[in-house]
């Protein structure tokens, strides 16, 4: 059985195409989850709507607690890390991470950055090899294959890797670096572009993105079945 962690980071609560001013990234994640569960209803999903209920920003108490060895944590420190522990537990339990996020001002929304800050945790998602002075970091979520699916929406066009406006898009590179840092290196990106232009430009991008989501679901489910057969052989 596969477990999916589904995160939506858009500040827009509705779904594009259904609600006025709805979210295109939420539209993509909804299609992914619906498509997945229609073929594999036995799989489970944990949902986090961080766009409407953002994680806490890290503060002094969090930092002091996160860098204290577990055996020396005081009660107030455990309380300071309780939210982070829950978010980390959800991530560790997942086989597929699905994030729906818009591109806001060249990068990720503040709510998604807050989630990233909460789940990059010394001793939980990343370790330290003190014998390595230049790059001592050891990703702890490389213990088993995990997939990340990043479904994005951006107002501009031609902002994908290698395209003319890619230099203004720091969302995907930031997420790729952060996820690889903790051991998630199988990352898939699908984007809707042209929200500012609207019209045929946006409509074409939406159609292509939804088709790509359905194809990705089929590919990932095929891989799940193949891995299950290999493990049972």
Image (cartoon, grey):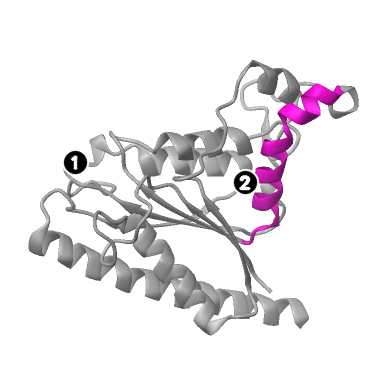
**150 and 46: which is toward the camera:** 46
Above or below, 201 relative to 136: below
Picture quadrant of residue 40: bottom right
Q: Secondary structure at mark 2?
A: loop
Mark 2, residue position: 183
First to last magenta residue range:
73-95
Q: Is residue 205 rendered to the left or right of residue 146?
A: left
**73 and 209: which is toward the camera:** 73
- Secondary structure predominantly adopted by residues drawn in magenta: helix
Question: Residue 158's spot in the image, x, y percent?
Answer: 18, 49
Q: Dot 1, crowdedness within 10 Å: few (<14), some or many (≥20)?
A: few
For the point 67% across and 20% down, the residue is 63
Picture quadrant of residue 133: top right
Dot 1 or dot 2: first in sequence order is 1
> Could you tell me which quadrant the N terminus lies in?
bottom right
Question: Residue 208's spot in the image, x, y percent?
Answer: 25, 69
> Could you say which disc has been placed on residue 165 in the image?
1
């Amino acid at each position: 059985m596969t477990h999916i962690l589904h995160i939506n980071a858009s500040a827009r609560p509705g779904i594009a195409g259904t609600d006025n001013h709805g979210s295109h990234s939420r539209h993509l994640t909804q299609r992914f989850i619906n498509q997945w569960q229609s073929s594999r209803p036995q799989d489970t999903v944990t949902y986090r709507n961080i766009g409407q209920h953002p994680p806490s920003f890290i503060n002094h108490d969090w930092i002091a607690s996160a860098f204290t060895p577990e055996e020396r944590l005081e009660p107030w420190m455990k309380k300071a890390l309780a939210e982070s522990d829950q978010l980390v537990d959800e991530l560790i339990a997942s086989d597929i991470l699905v994030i729906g996020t818009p591109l806001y001002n060249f990068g990720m929304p503040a709510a998604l950055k807050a989630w990233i800050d909460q789940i990059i945790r010394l001793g939980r998602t990343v370790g330290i090899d003190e014998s390595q002075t230049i790059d001592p970091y050891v990703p702890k979520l490389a213990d088993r294959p995990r997939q990340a699916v990043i479904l994005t929406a951006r107002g501009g066009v031609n902002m994908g890797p290698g395209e003319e406006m890619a230099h203004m898009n720091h969302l995907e590179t930031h997420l790729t670096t952060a996820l690889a840092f903790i051991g998630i290196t199988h990352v898939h990106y699908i984007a809707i572009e042209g929200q500012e232009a609207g019209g045929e430009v946006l409509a074409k991008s939406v159609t292509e993105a939804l088709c790509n989501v359905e194809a990705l679901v089929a590919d990932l489910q095929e891989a799940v079945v193949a891995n299950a057969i290999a493990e049972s052989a």
